[in-house]
Amino acid sequence: MKKTFIALALAASVAPAWAAEVVSSNIVGYNKVTVPAGLTIVGQQFVAVGGEDQSIQQITGEGLADAGQDMIQVWNGSSYDEYYYYTEDDDINGDGTAAWGNLDWEPVDITLPAGTGMWASTQNESVLVFSGQVGSHSTISFQPGLNLVTQALPMDIDIQDITGEGLADAGQDMIQVWNGSSYDEYYYYTEDDDINGDGTAAWGNLDWEPVSVTLKAGFGFWLSTQGSGTLTFPSVNAQ
């Protein structure tokens, strides 16, 4: 099976100083995401083998603290669902393996669809490892308000390659990318807004100018919208 090894470096002007290393194939792969101490928005971009939603237990960690000190926070549309990390020594599974659990030191049985963004809250610089099968769908749905999402497939993308159905005009809807201390904001302009000058839709700044931004594999972002609809991302090319 042919594998592709990709080392990713973040552009300082648009992203924080951490990085993701992607190792993937046409079928299965993994994504090692290095995060600093504190808060980072990461993204789950794989499906389980067979195509079902991926289990949270498939996310493994390197350098994560014990006793539920580190956690993942998943936005449910109005609040966060929190899942805590327990090491092999914590042994909440009873078989000497690490696991994600609740505050009662019990393993959780939840799945995270490809395209789910989440906060990672860590005590120290750590590595989160996402793995599974590369899916076939590059579209995710969104609801009015705040959506914590990521590209549906494990790849770097140009923000201008994200297309939308149901997005509002005139910069009313936006993507917010956490840079480690604040948000970089990119606004959606429709074909009628014509900020490209060629009648195409584009993401831009508050001055109605197109932006050049790369969204990195393994990281997530907020999507703030007036209505519901879908985002479509570029597809992974066969290697």
Image (cartoon, grey):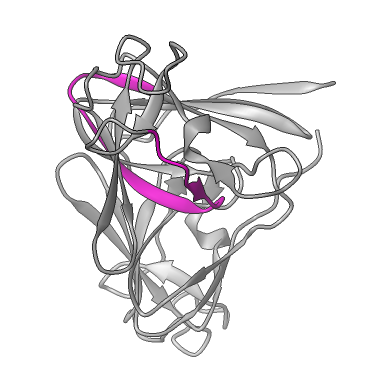
Q: Position of residue 152 (x, y in %)?
A: 58, 52
Asked if residue 99 is positioned above or below residue 166 in the image, the reply reads above
Q: Residue furthest left?
A: 181
Residue nearer the viewer, 54 or 142: 54
Q: Is residue 125 magenta?
A: yes
**Which span is picked out in magenta?**
107-127
Q: Is residue 110 magenta?
A: yes
Asked if residue 121 is positioned above or below residue 143 in the image, the reply reads above
Residue nearer the viewer, 5 or 41: 41
Q: Say whether residue 117 is left or right of residue 113.
A: left
Q: Residue furthest right?
A: 1
Q: Position of residue 195 (x, y in %)?
A: 44, 77
Rendered image quadrant of residue 36:
top left
Residue nearer the viewer, 196 or 132: 132
Q: Residue at x 26, y 55 (%)?
A: 80
Asked if residue 48 is positioned above or below residue 52 in the image, the reply reads above
